[in-house]
Image (cartoon, helix red, strand yellow):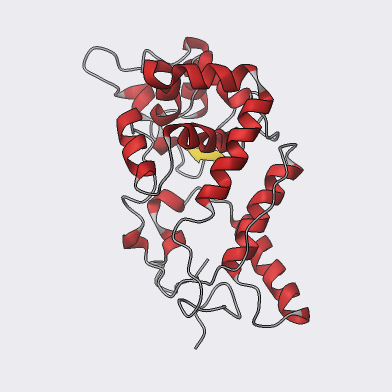
Amino acid sequence: MIASPNSDAEKDAQDNLSLAGDGFDTVIKAKQAVEQSCPGIVSCADILAIAARDVVVLGGGPSFNVELGRRDGLISQASRVAGNLPDPTFHLNELNTMFAEHNLSQNDMIALSGAHTLGFSHCSRFANRLYSFSSSSLVDPSLNSDYAKQLEAACPQNVDPSIAIDMDPVTPRTFDNVYYQNLVSGKGLFTSDQVLYTDPASQSTVVDFANSPGDFNGAFITAMRKLGRVGVKTGNNGEIRRDCTAFNS
């Protein structure tokens, strides 16, 4: 959330450039409104957690209680982001290793990946699957051939870097389990998406979530509650920012 004049804050990191600016604006405006009635009490971190839940609900997904009481961090550096977010090229073992470091299981990881039912990505994040996958196949063979052609048409080589593609090509504005149905059909945008189905160790969970919205929603709620406890600052750690875009002076 911190806005740096040098563009070196956490939100400026390459991995975060696909985050929508209006999402940041919404949290900033919510904080401003809360400060009018309840100054210095509610953190930007809590507002962000509530907003994430509300986006899920507004998209047609499940509602869930959000644990509150977080404080805001005192560090925001783009250089600290690498290695803390899953890379689009990750395979199952890499995904599991990263999530396990935060006490999140494989089932949690697969459920949280379902958040890709919403959102978008810039072409550069998956271009390797279309034009340089391997020496034997330029296109990732796990990609649905028709979907690959759609992506090539939308993301030709040397495309404008600002062009973005929906993560879910079927119901991109609805929070649902179609993301998993897409994986079964070979329509996962990232390697880290599609591998959840192509790897036998995770395939059964993907099939379950594809067939059962209730199973997915339940697993997603459980995983979000666990994710909401990762790296939390309480007590005297951190601060309650007055402005989400700046540390307190």
**Number of callouts in the render?**
0
Outermost residue to the right: 37
Residue displayed at 39% across by 52% down? 14
Is any part of residue 90 visible from this angle? yes
In the displayed structure image, the side of residue 94 where residue 30 appears, left or right = right
What is the x, y in percent for residue 31? 68, 71
Q: Nearer the viewer, residue 120 or 96?
A: 96
- Picture layout, residue 70 above or below residue 107: below
The residue at 47%/52% (across/down) is 17
Of 42 and 223, which appears nearest the observer?
223
Residue furthest out toward the left: 135
**Image: 90 above or below 141:** below
Residue drawn at x 67%, y 57% is 50
Depth check: 118 or 215 in front?
215
Residue 46: image x %, image y %? Answer: 61, 64
Instruction: Place residue 216 in its image quadrant.
Output: top right
Q: Quadrant of residue 27?
A: bottom right
- x and y percentages locating residue 205 in the rendered image: 50, 22
Viewed as shown, does residue 2 lie left or right of 128? Answer: right
User: Which residue is drawn at the image coordinates 70% and 68% (left, top)?
Assistant: 29
